[in-house]
Image (spheres, helix red, strand yellow):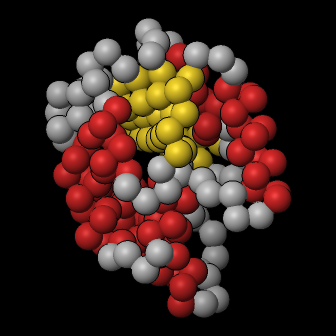
Amino acid sequence: MSGHLTLVLGGARSGKSRYAEELVKAAPAPWIYLATAQAFDTEMAVRIRRHRADRGHGWTTVEEPLDLVGALMRHASPQASVLVDCLTLWVSNLMGAGRDVSMACAAFADTLERLPGNVVLVSNEVGQGIVPDNAMAREFRDHAGRLHQMVAERARRVVFVIAGLPMNLKG
């Protein structure tokens, strides 16, 4: 791998995004925030605005709900630090768009090995709860779990954040 890849996992409201932002800001600018969220309703639009405001100045935000591989290829460079937030929303977006999620995740994982610079990926750990009661939710959980395994294999560092506290799993 030509760059430095970190995967930050955690549950909802675990502090994973804040921790990932701190990792990126420890490196020299430019800092690029690849956002996968889409504002389908007012509540999500408010969340997105709050996230932008909390990040503060110095970030270039790129909204990319589907073509994460293309966005990374365009924006990752030896001079930049890229934060992708988050992979589980990206998986949801792929499923909602009727894309081949397994193929997209494999292409994404293969791309990670070619990225220059510092890349930090954020994702929700979804495999520690109860088994979902419907097929679509189980499919989502399975896609996310397989993606996490592929990314963790390629990452130099993997961190699990709980209650704002980072636990190093790898690196």
Where is residue 100 drawn, in percent x and y?
33, 76
Pick the front one: 22 or 76: 76
Where is residue 15 drawn, in percent x and y?
68, 37
Q: Quadrant of residue 105?
A: bottom left
Relative vertical location of residue 35 with respect to residue 40 in this rendering, above or below: above
Where is residue 41 drawn, in percent x and y?
77, 64
Residue at (33% x, 40% y) in the render: 72
Is residue 37 visible in the rendered structure shown here?
Answer: yes
Relative vertical location of residue 157 with respect to residue 11 in this rendering, above or below: above
Looking at the image, residue 167 sits to the left or right of residue 71; the answer is right
Q: Of all residues shown, which one is farthest toward the top?
A: 28
Looking at the image, residue 104 sits to the left or right of residue 90; the answer is left
Residue at (59% x, 48% y) in the render: 10
| Image quadrant in which the N terminus is located | top left
Looking at the image, residue 18 sits to the left or right of residue 59; the answer is right
Is residue 124 visible in the rendered structure shown here?
Answer: no
Q: How many marks?
A: 0
Residue at (22% x, 47% y) in the render: 111
Where is residue 23 drawn, in percent x and y?
51, 22
| Image quadrant in which the C terminus is located | top left
Q: Quadrant of residue 80?
A: top left
Residue at (74% x, 28% y) in the render: 54
Pick the front one: 32 or 20: 32
